[in-house]
Amino acid sequence: MSNSIALHYFKTPYGELVLGSFKKQLCLCDWRYRKQRAAVDARIKKGLDADFTAETSVVIEETKKQLLNYFNKMQSTFDIPLLFIGTDFQKTVWEALIQIPYGKTSSYLELSNQLNNPKAIRAIASANGANALSIIVPCHRIIGSNGDLVGYAGGLPTKKNSFS
């Protein structure tokens, strides 16, 4: 493989993130110690036909700056070029997640109805769990239909006590 994905570890008040960029786009912003780390990394490397290289980039540095502003409640949206690596269905779900406003939540059921696919709740939950751009693509804004917190790669305590 001749392509490389810049990979950088970033400690935040909520845990350590792995940031990755490829050709001036962010392709990875995920929890370093999540259970599906190996699967997410393999999907990205295969999808880009590239390997990780320990380095930073302009996109990674801008992401760090915007994440810190977000955590400090100085901004509520992100302006970073994103590169989704996944199926067309996953990309549709991730685009829908981006539309959930700061401070609001949604459920898998609401998301499936929004996507005109009310029987796809489990597939939507799976796509949500496969999100490699955590926080920026706000999978943390998804709750259970009964209002309970449901799985989060950064852990439920992070989801509960952290950010909108």
Image (cartoon, rainbow, N blue to C red):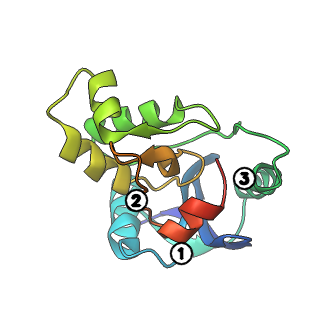
Label 2 SS: helix
- Residue at the image position 64 percent from the left and 36 percent from the top: 102
Residue 59, percent across and down? 71, 51
Instruction: Say which of 143 and 26 sits in front.
Output: 143
Tell me the quadrant of the picture where the N terminus can be found.
bottom left
Residue 158, percent across and down? 58, 67
**Mark 2, residue position:** 44
Which residue is situated farthest in the left direction here? 119
- Residue at the image position 35 percent from the left and 71 percent from the top: 36
As drawn, is 117 to the left or to the right of 64?
left
Mark 2 or mark 1: name the one nearer the start of the chain: 1
Q: Quadrant of residue 79?
A: top right
Q: CA distance from mark 2 to mark 3?
A: 18 Å
Picture disc at residue 63: 3
Label 3 SS: helix
Mark 1 or mark 3: name the one nearer the start of the chain: 1
Residue 23, visible in the rendered structure: no
Mark 2 or mark 3: name the one nearer the start of the chain: 2
Task: Please rate how many residues cluster around mark 2, counting C-alpha atoms within 10 Å: few if below 14, some from 14 to 19, many from 20.
Answer: many
Instruction: Say which of 73 and 147 sits in front.
Output: 147
Amino acid carrying label 1: it is Arg
- Residue at the image position 76 percent from the left and 53 percent from the top: 58
Instruction: Say which of 153 and 5 sits in front.
Output: 153
Q: Quadrant of residue 145?
A: top left
**Mark 1, residue position:** 32
